[in-house]
Every structure is written in structure tokens, then in C-alpha cells.
Image (cartoon, rainbow, N blue to C red):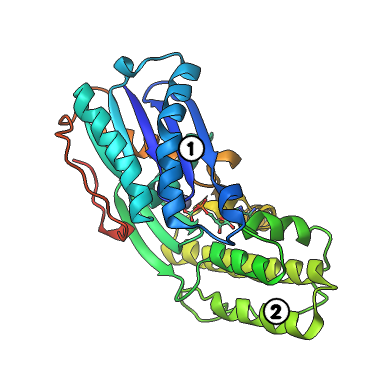
Amino acid sequence: MRVLGIESSCDETGIALYDTKRGLLAHALHSQVAMHAEYGGVVPELASRDHIRRALPLIRQVLERAGYTLKEVDGIAYTQGPGLAGALLVGASIASGLGFALNLPTVGVHHLEGHLLSPRLAEPMPEFPFIALLVSGGHTQLMRVDGVGQYRLLGETLDDAAGEAFDKTAQLLGLGYPGGPAISDLAESGDAYRYKLPRPMLNSGDLEFSFAGLKTAVLTLVKREGLDHAADIAAAFQLAAVEVLTAKSIAALKQNGLNRLVIAGGVGANRQLRERLNSEARRRQFKVFYPPLDLCTDNGAMIAYAGALRLWPNGVGRVGRAADGRFSVRPRWELAELEAPT
Ligand code: KG4
Ligand code: ZN
């Protein structure tokens, strides 16, 4: 069975074709980063309009690369939420229109479920149950995952998300948007121990996070020191964030008696986070799984994959109901609300 996946929740148009037997056949992405960069963040209306421009050409491109036509697609998956309402509507309406016209089952996917399951697109594939650390621009959550749709929230950020903290810190350091890769690159040449930044909630005894204080500490530091040592500040910030994320992930594994940790979401691309987790994993005998590097940030492959698992929970065979042309989006949608597919 082949699923066409459409992601348009934020500033990336992602399209992919996934085959339940052969895996990912092709995927393509258009990032709007350059377009939003001059505004210092995503402008929702511009994002929606750009998704409209990009989606159909990308769908054609993906099908061509995979060597299939639309007639050979068996189902369609799109990001239903959470995300920007206008941006979500573009993917949802294109998916539902195609599904209706081609008489195909069409499913709305939770964006974070896509991220969460994306490490299963890599080898070795993490078996259930596992602990997932979801670290994106909008979310920082630790979840216990017992199967598709079986997600229990163990802890989350009380204020800023980890990616948001990277983005805001980058702005304070004059690095532009998105901040994660920029901070990570600058930190390479910095001394992480020149300045000491707080590790918020490190010893709170629970699995909650807080990153707003860290950002404020960076602001205070920049005001005091200026930007002469920006690389050192970037390195100190990154180390503080990485230490907290690593420590809480280990605590979640311990509390649940599990030894598999899955990292998902944009911040999962961070080199230092990966190094730290890998060395802890060797030391403490747990396994850590990541999505392929190009599938860490938003993409269509994770949506096609999660959609396939929801359309055909048992692999091949049962075909869901064809789309009736109606659709809705859910800009706010908690992951823990999801249920296992039946
Ligand atoms: O998952 P994602 O692409 O979009 C959301 O669903 O939010 O995550 C985007 C976030 C941004 O905040 C970006 O700065 C961060 O992921 N990010 C990184 C890195 N690459 C992307 N943060 C730290 N290090 C990176 N290498
Ligand atoms: Zn995302």
C-alpha cells in the first residue's frame, strides 16, 4: 500500500510517498526559512500562501522521483494539527480534494505523532514500549509510548519549548532565524565554561522543563558582556539546554524501567545533544534512536508513515473509508488525546 503524505503545519511544505512494504519511496521539501528570515520568525499568512504555491509541484516531483502516478496511490495522509490554522488548511484541503477525486481513504495525522514515530523510518527500528523526548519549536515533552496511539505524557515544558529557547537565544546573539542550527554552529568555536548559565528544573525531581529563565539569563549576560564573546555564550546556552534534556530523559527511562529512548523533533538534529545522549547511553546501557537527520525537522515522510499506520494498522489489506470531501484542522491538539487505531 502506498500513502502520499502532506505536511504543511508551519514553514515547511513536505511531501512524501511511503510504501508499507518497501518503505519510503521518495520525499521532497520546500523550506520557507529564507522567506521568513527577514521578519525574524514565521509570518502565518505568508506561510499559507507559500504552501499553496509549493504543494502541487512537490507532489508531482515526488511521484515522478518514485516512478508512480497518482492512480497508483492507495491513501492520503495530511497534517491535521497542531500548527498554524491557515497553513494546515492548505494541506488538509489539497489532501481531501485529492482523496475525494480519486476515491481514496484520507487520514488527518497529528504532527507530533509523525515526529514521534519517525525514528521507526531508520534502522534499527525502536520497538515499543519506549520513552520519547519530543523537542521541537513548539513542544518539549517526555512521553511514554506503548504503541501507535498509546501515548502518556510524563512531563513537559512549563513555558518555552527547547527549540523556541534556541530561536530566542539566537535572536539575542544576532544570529537570525531559525536559531537552532545557528547556535549549534557558533557554539563549535566557543568555550562552554567561560560563563555559567542556570540548568532550570534540573533537580526538580519531576519530568517537567522550563526554558524561559535560561533565555532571560542569556539576555542578562548579553547586556553585561555585549557580543564580543557570542560564541562562548552560545556554547554555554547549548550545554545548559543539552544537560537538562539529557538528565530528564534518563530520569524518565529509570522511572519507567525502560531502556529505549527515542528523540524526535527539530532539536533532535542538535549535534551536542546527540553526542551527550550517545555517551550516556553507552555508560548506562540504554539505547537511543533518532530519525534520519533529514527527517528530524518537519517533513512529509513522517506524515506518510504515521498515516500508513493509521490507515492500515495491520499492514496490508483493510482499506479505510474513502474521503467524502469534508475535512477539518486542529491547530491545538494534545498528543495524549490520540487513541490506538482500530
Ligand atoms: O520539529 P521542527 O522542525 O518544527 C516544529 O514542529 O516546531 O523544529 C524546529 C525547531 C526550531 O526551533 C529550530 O531552531 C530547532 O528545531 N532546531 C535545532 C536544530 N535544528 C533545528 N535546535 C538545535 N540544534 C539544531 N541543530
Ligand atoms: Zn515539527
Q: Residues within 10 Å of mark 2 (few under 14, many from 20)?
A: many
Q: Nearer the viewer, residue 70 or 287?
A: 70
Quadrant of res 179: bottom right
Tell me the CA gap for discs 1 and 2.
36 Å
Q: Residue at x 34, y 28 (%)?
A: 3
Residue under pointer 2: 197
Q: Position of residue 12 (x, y in %)?
A: 49, 45
Please, what is the three-letter code of the amino acid marked with disc 2? Leu
Quick check: can you spot residue 126? no
Left or right side of 230 for 109: left
Residue under pointer 1: 125
Left or right side of 73 for 123: right
Asked if 241 appears above or below 327 in the picture, the reply is below
Q: Residue at x 24, y 47 (%)?
A: 340
Left or right side of 7 for 330: left
Left or right side of 195 for 317: left
* Secondary-structure class at tag 2: loop
Q: Residue at x 48, y 23 (%)?
A: 61
Quadrant of res 242: bottom right
Q: Nearer the viewer, residue 315 or 332?
A: 332
The quadrant of the image that shows the N terminus is top left
Q: Position of residue 275 (x, y in %)?
A: 69, 53
* Secondary-structure class at tag 1: loop
Say if disc 1 is inside 8 Å of ligand 1. Answer: no
Q: Please say if the residues under marks 1 and 2 sit with CB atoms less than 8 Å apart.
A: no
Please, what is the three-letter code of the amino acid marked with disc 1? Met
Which one is in front in this view, the residue at disc 1 or the one at disc 2? 2
The quadrant of the image that shows the C terminus is top left
Q: Earlier in the sequence, mark 1 or mark 2?
A: 1
Q: Residue at x 42, y 54 (%)?
A: 45
Q: Nearer the viewer, residue 292 or 6?
A: 6
